[in-house]
Image (tube, rainbow, N blue to C red):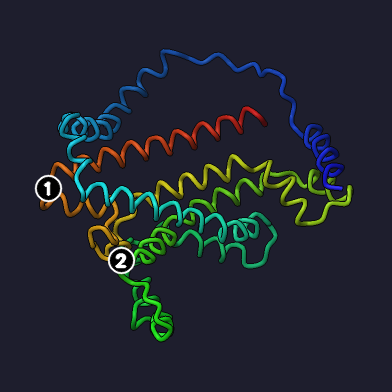
């Protein structure tokens, strides 16, 4: 049954794809772009100079030496471990929300969409305080959890919750856009062939929106990797326990500038790779469709 549905769906999907014939792009004026380049230079230079200054400041030998320190190694390991967990949580629990947001005629859709967007515009310090009064020992839910011996604030779990709170909307929004971009005719073809709602989601919606899902998960991971404000308030800054790379940079700026510079370069490199992955995936998705 599954093989029959999959084969029939592949035919329907190919028929639903737009024409891939080469497009004739209009000739682009060359000289008219020169003025725009000149107008763009001030802000481009402002964005580039701090990055160049950071890389010029750190020598390769010193970079490796600082990254080999115990503080940097612990911060890197903790950041990678917690961000992977927070990204997984965003994917597992954010996918149902994204599916709801993809329905244009859903009641209270705008309210749900606003609620999802709120952590992205909320000041990080406010997010940290909100998490603390919710899950702290004297918080709304923290007191009940404390009676069962569960303590979240100022632990590694608090780091994960803070990262998930501020980063999950990136995945949800990207996934919702990917789900909404799938034509109803493809879903109807799958339903006519006897596919259940779960099979349509598994064999049609997920494969056709995989680039949006991976892009959203990558952006969520990158945002979680750079999370600072909510983490330092809700989880604290304890080396080896809750000190992620951004927190280690903050502490290193006061105590050991070399470690802060080395971790800054690592974060920039990882952020650049994450953005590159997202752009490549989106480019391939555009070329496919």
Please provide percent x and percent y for residue 224: 39, 52
Q: Residue at the location (68% across, 41% down)?
A: 208
Among numbered discs 2 and 1, the one appearing first in the sequence:
2
Q: Nearer the viewer, residue 58 or 117?
A: 58
| 123 lies left or right of 101 | left
Cα–Cα gap, marks 2 and 1: 22 Å
Q: Residues within 10 Å of mark 1 (few under 14, many from 20)?
A: some
Please provide percent x and percent y for residue 58: 16, 33
Q: Residue at the location (62% across, 67% down)?
A: 108
Q: Nearer the viewer, residue 146 or 138?
A: 146
Residue found farthest to the left: 255
Please provide percent x and percent y for residue 192: 89, 49
Q: Residue at the location (44% across, 13% down)?
A: 30
> Given contact means CB atoms under 8 Å apart, are the residues at marks 2 and 1 in contact?
no
The residue pinned by badge 1 equals 256
On the image, which quarter does residue 143 sit in?
Answer: bottom left
Q: Residue at the location (42% across, 17% down)?
A: 32
On the image, which quarter does residue 204 sit in?
Answer: top right
Q: Look at the numbered disc 2 and give the secondary structure of its residue.
A: loop
The residue pinned by badge 2 equals 235
| 134 lies left or right of 27 | left
Q: Which mark is residue 247?
A: none
Q: Residues within 10 Å of mark 2 (few under 14, many from 20)?
A: many
Note whether 16 is above or below 176 in the view shown: above
Note whether 113 is above or below 213 in the view shown: below
Please provide percent x and percent y for residue 43: 28, 33
Note whether 49 is above or below 170 in the view shown: above
């Amino acid at each position: 049954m599954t093989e029959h549905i999959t084969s029939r769906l592949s035919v329907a999907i190919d028929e639903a794809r737009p024409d891939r014939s080469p497009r004739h792009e209009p000739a682009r004026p060359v000289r008219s772009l020169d003025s725009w380049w000149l107008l763009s230079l001030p802000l481009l230079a402002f964005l580039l100079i701090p990055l160049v200054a950071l890389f010029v400041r750190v020598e390769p030998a010193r970079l490796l030496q600082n990254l080999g320190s115990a503080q940097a190694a612990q911060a890197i390991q903790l950041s990678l471990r917690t961000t992977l967990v927070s990204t997984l949580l965003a994917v597992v629990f954010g996918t149902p929300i994204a599916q709801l947001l993809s329905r244009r005629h859903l009641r209270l859709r705008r309210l749900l969409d606003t609620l999802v967007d709120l952590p992205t515009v909320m000041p990080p310090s406010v997010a940290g305080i909100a998490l603390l009064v919710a899950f702290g020992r004297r918080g709304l839910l923290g007191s009940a959890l404390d009676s069962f011996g569960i303590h979240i604030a100022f632990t590694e779990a608090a780091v994960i919750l803070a990262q998930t709170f501020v980063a999950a909307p990136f995945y949800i929004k990207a996934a919702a856009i990917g789900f909404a971009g799938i034509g109803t005719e493809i879903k109807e073809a799958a339903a006519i062939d006897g596919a259940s709602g779960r099979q349509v989601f598994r064999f049609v919606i997920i494969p056709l929106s995989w680039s949006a899902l991976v892009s959203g998960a990558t952006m969520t991971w990158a945002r979680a990797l750079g999370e600072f404000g909510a983490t330092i308030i809700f989880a604290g800054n304890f080396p080896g326990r809750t000190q992620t790379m951004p927190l280690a940079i903050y502490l290193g700026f006061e105590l050991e500038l070399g470690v802060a510079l080395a971790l800054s370069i690592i974060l920039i490199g990882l952020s650049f790779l994450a953005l590159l992955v997202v752009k490549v995936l989106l480019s391939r998705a555009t070329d496919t469709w």
